[in-house]
Amino acid sequence: MKSRVLGSAVLGLGAALVLAGCGAGQITQTDSMLPAVNGALGQAGKLAVRNASLVNRDQCQQAYTAGSDAPVQFTIANAGTQDDQLVAVSSPNAAGGTVDGQKIVVAGSKLVVGPAASGATQAADTKIGHASVTLTGVKSTIWPGQTIPVTFAFRDSGTVTMNLPIGAPSKPLSCESTAQVKPGS
């Protein structure tokens, strides 16, 4: 009787070990999933640019028209041991770009860029500084759902180009359509 119980225990333990190892070392279905954020993701050396997008106008007309300026929002995380600096932002879809405020991305911390960052609570050990970036003189209308290429240039880490969308509205919009759509338009 003892040998049956011992044999069953050994078989049970063996089956548990085999089942536990079934997925070990395998490529998972979730290994290439991106986080659920509205903006684009990019990497330049040790700098990670995350959740980058054009700021939503928070108006019923969310598009940026030709000639307008489009503020950009994103976070830069510096995983390196040396400080770096955001020196320029540009796009072939804009006449220029401005970078104002904090430009240094301190080693081991984050730099939050955009209007949402101004009211954010800052943790001294993880987020240092605030900056604002604006694409000036948009060359053609940019609609929600459309992306435009934007290049971020850093002093030491080089450049990264990402396709940025217009971000989601930061507040509920109550827009009533007064336009009549004609059949066939």
Image (cartoon, rainbow, N blue to C red):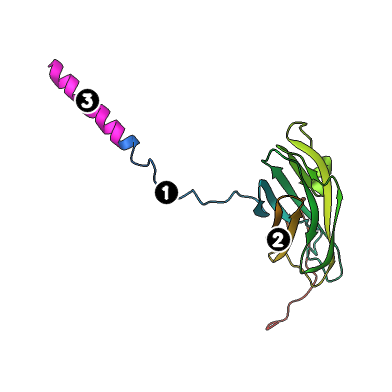
Seen from the viewer's position, the closer of residues 97 and 44 is 44
Name which residue lies at 38% across and 40% down: 24
Which label was assigned to residue 27? 1
Which label was assigned to residue 165? 2
Which label was assigned to residue 10? 3
Q: Position of residue 81 (x, y in %)?
A: 69, 38
Q: Earlier in the sequence, mark 1 or mark 2?
A: 1
What's under tag 3, amino acid-wise?
A: Val
- Magenta segment main secondary structure: helix
What's under tag 2, amino acid-wise?
A: Pro
Q: How many marks?
A: 3
Name which residue lies at 26% across and 33% down: 15
Task: Give the magenta-colored segment's residue range.
Answer: 1-18
What's under tag 1, amino acid-wise?
A: Ile
Q: Is residue 39 covered in magenta? A: no
* Res 96 seen here: yes
Q: Is residue 3 covered in magenta? A: yes
Q: Position of residue 45 (x, y in %)?
A: 66, 49
Q: Give the structural element (helix, strand or loop) at label 3.
A: helix
Which picture quadrant has residue 17? Answer: top left
Mark 3–mark 2 Cα distance, whole angstroms, equals 58 Å
Say which quadrant the N terminus sits in: top left
Q: Give the structural element (helix, strand or loop) at label 2.
A: strand
Which label was assigned to residue 110? none
Q: Position of residue 5 (x, y in %)?
A: 18, 20
Instruction: Verify CB contact (< 8 Å) between mark 3 and mark 2.
Output: no
* Res 166 seen here: no
> Around disc 3, counting alpha carbons within 10 Å, would you say few (fewer than 14), some (14 to 19), or many (20 or more)?
few
Q: Earlier in the sequence, mark 3 or mark 1?
A: 3
